[in-house]
Image: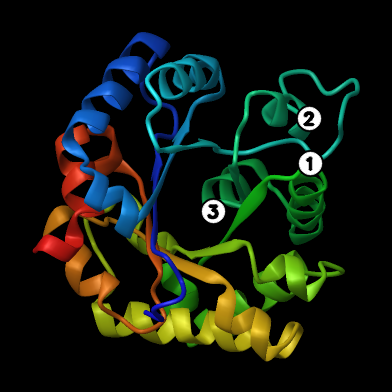
Amino acid sequence: MADDRKPLISGNWKMHQNHFEAIQAVQKLSYLLTKEDIAAVDVSIHAPFTDIRSVQTTIESDKIPITIGAQDCHPEVKGAFTGEVSVSMLAKLNVGLVIVGHSERRELFGETDEFVNAKVKAVFAHEMLPILCCGETLAEREAGEAESKISGQITAGLAKIPAEQVARMVIAYEPIWAIGTGVTASAEDAQAMCAHVRQVVAEAKDADAAASVRIQYGGSVKPANAAELMGQADIDGALVGGASLEPDDFAKIVQYRLN
């Protein structure tokens, strides 16, 4: 990991935690993290939409140095999109980071690369930063198609995004076969794919954008494997699922440098 790319550890709670539980989890996490932790690592919590206001109030009233995140968004500012949440609504809640193109959105809800690209543009337009997700299935990996799948997702996701914006965003590599399965890519495999992500950014934009963009690894990240993963040259953080639901475990991941 380059010295000038500050690590970003993001907790993706998915469809877990009601707003009472969210408040308790954020408060407990704040007690576990030290000033040294926050100086060394950026931290974001991506709660369900129903929790974000409660998380915002807790973070701001207690002056907790954690970024408010969202798990998804709709690219339109407003409209007849029942059940959706717009980028402008998130911006008003002081959300700083928005996950877009998560594999669960792509696989379960049929989101296309073009729709994901529209979200990336919308997030930037509302002065937030996207975490663009990419990842391959086990079948694609076994067929030798992992790199081409990732190349296609990133190239399409970054279409018509200026290089200077790409340099500030985050890309999360999450092999679909490792999400929630307990199976983690080896540190070497994770590094190889994150290096590929960086190369694709260089080819799609430029070398400066590739050098600056932060690349997270996601997929069964735990306290036990966080330090090894984070020690890789092209891994600048982690997008943590299940382990982020337990403040003790998540804090240990944030504190990976102490392991």
- Answer yes or no: do the residues labelled 2 and 1 have beta carbons within 8 Å? yes
- Answer yes or no: do the residues labelled 3 and 2 have beta carbons within 8 Å? no
Describe residue 151's horizontal placement relative to residue 102 as left or right: right
N-term mark: 2 or 1: 2
Describe residue 96's horizontal placement relative to residue 186 as left or right: right
The local crowd at label 1, few if under 14, some if 14 to 19, many if 20 or more residues have their Cα within 10 Å, is: some
The CA distance from mark 3 to mark 2 is 23 Å
Residue 23: in sight, yes or no?
yes
| Residue 255 image point, x, y percent | 19, 54
Name the residue nearer the viewer: 145 or 96: 96
What label sits on residue 247 in the rendered view? Answer: none
- Answer yes or no: do the residues labelled 1 and 3 have beta carbons within 8 Å? no
Give the amino acid at mark 3.
Answer: Ser
What label sits on residue 103 in the rendered view? Answer: 3
Q: Quadrant of residue 230?
A: bottom left
The local crowd at label 3, few if under 14, some if 14 to 19, many if 20 or more residues have their Cα within 10 Å, is: many
The CA distance from mark 1 to mark 3 is 23 Å
Give the amino acid at mark 2.
Answer: Ser
The CA distance from mark 2 to mark 1 is 7 Å
Give the structural element (helix, strand or loop) at label 3: helix
Name the residue nearer the viewer: 30 or 229: 30
Residue that carries the numbered disc 2 in the rendered image: 88
N-term mark: 1 or 3: 3
What label sits on residue 126 in the rendered view? Answer: 1
